[in-house]
Image (spheres, rainbow, N blue to C red):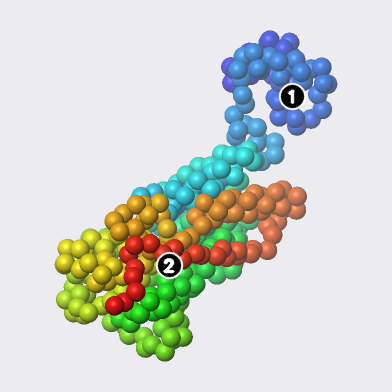
Amino acid sequence: MDMGIKEVAKLAGVSVSTVSRALNETTYVKDETRLRVLDAAHKLNYSPNAFAKGLKSNKSNTIALVIPDIGNMIFPKITQGVEQVMRKNGYITVLCNTGEDGNAEQEYIKTLAGQRIDGFIFATMTKQSAYINELRNQGVPVVLAGRYNDESIDAIGVDNFKAGYDATNYLIGIGHRKIVFVMGNPKLCLYEQRLAGYKKALEDNGMEYHDEYVLHEMYDSISLYAQTKKLFERIPDIEAIVASSDPKAFTIMRALRDIGKNIPGDVSVVGIDDVEISALIDPPLSTVAQPLIRMGELAAKKLIAQIQYKERTGALMEPTVDILDVRLIIRGTTEKRR
């Protein structure tokens, strides 16, 4: 038995079980007794463990936020939004970084599910993440943030098609014709959606799509750097590049400088994300902004709603996917084609 609770019981002149009932409000305790217990707990600076408080209600007031890469600049913003809402609503957020490793992610799930986590927010969904669907099928509240495949799980996403479309359509509008699209991880549906937007913008402007104008990132930023240099050896008159994320745009910009290309004089570059550093680099990056903090906030609110619904009914609500708008921001890496 916790010595802390014994000391509270001794000071209040009641039994340990009465202290537990008074603090957890699980059964009736006289107001006078409850006040004595609360006063004793305050004097001793005693606070019951969150998991202990959840024993009766089967709640821990703890949720898990699972992210794929803590070094990726978009995830701190999503985390900020989630944590702010959860803290205001009395929840603790456990942050899990998987390193894009599905096995590590499944280990997190096994460990945390065994500790009565109230729900999960995943920013890690890929085409191979069937175990996340299975978690929801088992009745666990689950919400996806950013990455989602379909409408089988609650999700907060952005209009990735519009992001790819708006970036490409803008470049066409300022006179660019030879426009490259830099593709991301093919396991993520969001990159396919952004590529589809790129293709549609070309079509709507009477331009043909060419496979050779799509650069597929193979492994990491180092390989993308090399791929960019090789691309310009093969097609030296490329006029503009749409990068499917801001970090990819940063790598491309470095490669362009190293082969003597001026940005935006020789090549215009547009990213997708609007991470903070995009406005600080030289020249500042034109990009399509995702509302990352808002995404985290809404994912947290959606998860709380699912947790509360399950408490009332014993089941989960039908899943919904909410799509947030994106916004094109014009900065210094793009200019009208001369």
The secondary structure type at the circle numbered 2 is loop
Q: Residue at x 22, y 75 (%)?
A: 231
What is the quadrant of the N terminus in the image? top right
Indicate whether 147 appears above or below 312: below
Query: Which residue is found at the position 34% from the left and 70% from the top?
Result: 335
Three-letter residue code for mark 2:
Leu
**Label disc, if present, on residue 188 of the rendered structure:** 2
Residue at x 79%, y 30% (from the top left corner) = 27
Please state which amino acid type lies under the numbered disc 1.
Ala
Above or below: residue 201 compared with residue 312: below
Relative placement, left or right, of 32 versus 198 is: right
Residue holding disc 1: 22
Depth order, front residue of 152/193 = 193
* Dot 1 alpha-carbon crowd within 10 angstroms: few under 14, some 14 to 19, many 20 or more: many
Among the two numbered marks 1 and 2 on one chain, the one whose residue lies closer to the N terminus:
1
Q: x, y (%) of residue 248?
A: 32, 63
